[in-house]
Amino acid sequence: MLRVFGIVLKLWFEGRMSVTTSVFLEESKGNNSHFVERSQSQAVFIAAEDPLQNLCLASQEVLQKAQRSGRSKCLKCGGSRMFYCYTCYVPVENVPTEQIPFVKLPLKIDIIKHPNETDGKSTAVHAKLLAPEFVNIYTYPCIPEYEGKDHEVALVFPGPQSISIKDISFHLQKRIQNKDRGKNDEPDKPCFKRKKTEEQEGCDLNEGKGTTLKKIIFIDSTWNQTNKILTDERLQGLLQVELKTRKTCFWRHQKGKPDTFLSTIEAIYYFLVDYHTDILKEKYRGQYDNLLFFYSFMYQLIKNAKYAGDKESTKLTH
């Protein structure tokens, strides 16, 4: 009798354990499935929040090493800097120049910097570091002479008179026609069909490429300080271009301003990408991505620091 009771008890216990185990496994499976689903949704969210993740960049190992070793000396002025010297426009000692990418641009770029713009916070220097042969930086009121060049120079800045990049060719050609018409209308000069000069032939070649644009100007300043430069008489009459569809991911974005107000290096990069496809009519294959070599690295550093800070804050509040 005791033996039979022991067998029954054993079967009941094993059956209950089997049911419990089965329920536990089902619950675990459900929890794991929920975890995987949540992780995947987080990954999608992170991807959507990181517009710089698919750039074709040179290896940033040199920046990673420099970050670990800390600030280094500028070989020109001797100042202590991280990654590069923002006053001399050169990489610092622990960031060898040969390990920094060189970017070839289709246009010359002039950057006019507001005198009150903090050098260490400006992204304009990135362009000078990475495309030194194509980029010049001037501190206002120092501005190059653009008089008589309004058919080959444009200013990137939003405003009521701004046009989109795809309309640049039309407006520049219109200016050339107006200049030619004005010359032919001079009363003291007979209207002869002029022989093409080398410069005109060059313009015709550029027409085949879609534009006579040779130089683009960017203003490097906080948005609240731009008016002084924008209203300078030396910039009046220049074609004004706006990047209407691009959004900033700058970590110092100014409150109250739309997300289409870009940092200087973002504006340069996005302008060139759109110029490449809309004006040169060529497929973009990442030719200018390295203009964001420093910017993307800093963006990731700040994003990671913010994420770590948010995690720590969550721990403290729970």
Image (cartoon, rainbow, N blue to C red):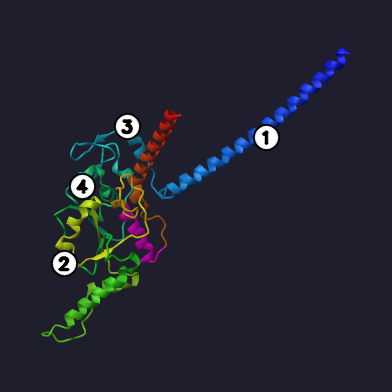
Question: Viewer-proximal residue, 12 or 301?
Answer: 12
> Cα distance, mark 3 to mark 2?
48 Å
In the displayed structure, 166 sits above or below 127; it is below
Q: Secondary structure at mark 3?
A: helix
Q: Which residue is mark 4?
A: 117
Left or right of 2? Residue 307 is left
Report, in whole angstroms, how far the alpha carbon at label 4 lies from the one at label 2.
26 Å
- The residue lying at 34 percent from left, 72 percent from top is 208
Give the numbered dot on residue 99: none
Q: For residue 205, say whether it is visible.
A: no
| Count of numbered circles on the image | 4
Q: Amino acid at mark 4?
A: Glu
Q: Classify residue 9 as left or right of residue 137.
A: right
Horizontal side of 156 relative to 1 (left or right) equals: left
Mark closest to the chain's N terminus, 3 or 4? 3
Q: Which residue is mark 2?
A: 147
Q: Tell me if mark 1 has few (under 14), some (14-19) or many (20+) residues whose alpha carbon lies within 10 angstroms of its own.
A: few
Q: Are marks 4 and 1 in contact (CB under 8 Å)?
A: no
Q: Residue furthest top?
A: 2
- For the question of whether residue 276 can be seen, the reply is yes
- Which disc, if any, is residue 69? 3
Circle 2: element type: loop
Q: CA distance from mark 3 to mark 1?
A: 50 Å
Quick check: 267 above or below 205?
above
Label 1, label 2: how many angstroms apart (C-alpha)?
77 Å
Q: Residue 13 at what x, y percent from top left?
A: 77, 21
Question: What is the magenta range?
Answer: 266-282
Disc 2 residue type?
Glu
